[in-house]
Image (spheres, rainbow, N blue to C red):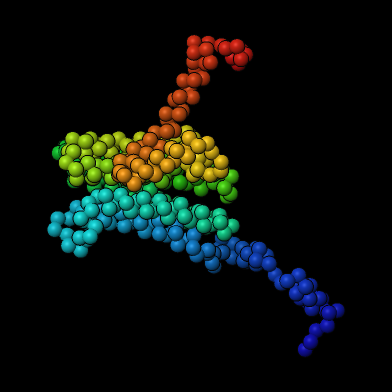
Amino acid sequence: MIRSKDHPDAAAEFVDQRRGGDTRRARRRRRLRRYGRRAYIRSVYTLPSLCTLGNAVCGFASMYVGFLIMIPGEKFGNPWVTHGMAAAAYLIFLAMLFDALDGRLARFARHTTDFGGQLDSLADVISFGAAPAFLMLLVFKQFGPDLPFRMHQIIWSVGAVYLACAAVRLARFNVSNKHGEQHHFSFLGLPSPGAAAAVAGVVLMQQELRNRGWSFLADMCVLLLPVLVGVTGFLMISSIRYPHMVNRYLRGKHSIARLVVALTLLLLLVVAHQYTVGVASVAYALWGPASYLYVRFRRKSGPTGKGGPTMAGPVV
């Protein structure tokens, strides 16, 4: 039976057709009303989600490769074992590349969603929380000095604290994160990829120094690792501001001097990337407390350098 436009139901259907049918937002609202909290996500944006999952897989592979190296006479992982712990560190940096790509792809396609943000943080807990702490424990176990069992328990506790701080930092980021490039020029606390880069960079330096026969410096890097892991863990949950290096210093117009500095860093990466990555990563991790102390010292000393009131006005 064909309904006329005068029928109420037919009139409603006709209006819907004139408006182009039901919208996606209206369908989502109806699904939420129907299922409440049981409403689920039917589809995701494939390319950014694949990059996020690649981030998690690289973090898991880093732990697996590091564990393979510890097994004497392991044959299955020979291509990885020949590169030592450096292979596990490189996988963490590969996870950082995937982590940078997924956000860029989502913003480029204008498809930033809460689902992508939650999935990204879960992947970051694996790659930048568990993997660096586990890698530190493996390196210290293999190349560190013989210490009492109690000291090894303390070092394990440092890795556990680092993992907990990374989880707290990512949870805080999820709560306060805002979509849009204009909200990503600085971070509250050390970003978890920056902390992981510092740990993996020191591992790269340690492996390169060991291969060149500089055992004393390599041993110093091993002893530095637990301290670095503990410091970067607390810096992740601190209230110190860290700049976004790409958004703040590489985008837009800048002076020729900054271009020369960027070119110098690229050349150093080509010549000696292990030392460049290691030193640069540790320097970025220490950037926050160094700048914080510098600002506090400047405020305390004042423009006159005597620590008292200045000509700019009374101290309130």
* Residue at figure coordinates x 51%, y 20% from the top left: 299
Seen from the viewer's position, the closer of residues 109 and 3 is 109
Which quadrant of the structure image shows residue 25? bottom right
Seen from the viewer's position, the closer of residues 231 and 299 is 299
**Which quadrant, please, contains the C terminus?**
top right
Image label count = 0
Residue 280 visible in the displayed image: yes
Q: Residue furthest bottom?
A: 1
- Please provide percent x and percent y for residue 28: 63, 64
* Residue at figure coordinates x 37%, y 43% from the top left: 267
Seen from the viewer's position, the closer of residues 191 and 35 is 191
**Which quadrant, please, contains the N terminus?**
bottom right
User: Would you place residue 192 above or below residue 288 in this image?
Assistant: below
Residue 236 visible in the displayed image: no
- Please provide percent x and percent y for residue 37: 56, 60
Task: Classify residue 224 as left or right of residue 14.
Answer: left
Task: Classify residue 5 as left or right of residue 167.
Answer: right
Task: Classify residue 118 as left or right of residue 154.
Answer: right
User: Would you place residue 70 above or below residue 199 in this image?
Assistant: below
* Residue at figure coordinates x 65%, y 66% from the top left: 24
* Residue at figure coordinates x 31%, y 44% from the top left: 271
Seen from the viewer's position, the closer of residues 248 and 44 is 248
- Please provide percent x and percent y for residue 138: 24, 47
Which quadrant of the structure image shows residue 15? bottom right
User: Would you place residue 188 above or below residue 61 in this image?
Assistant: above
- Please provide percent x and percent y for residue 276: 34, 41
Which quadrant of the structure image shows residue 288? top left
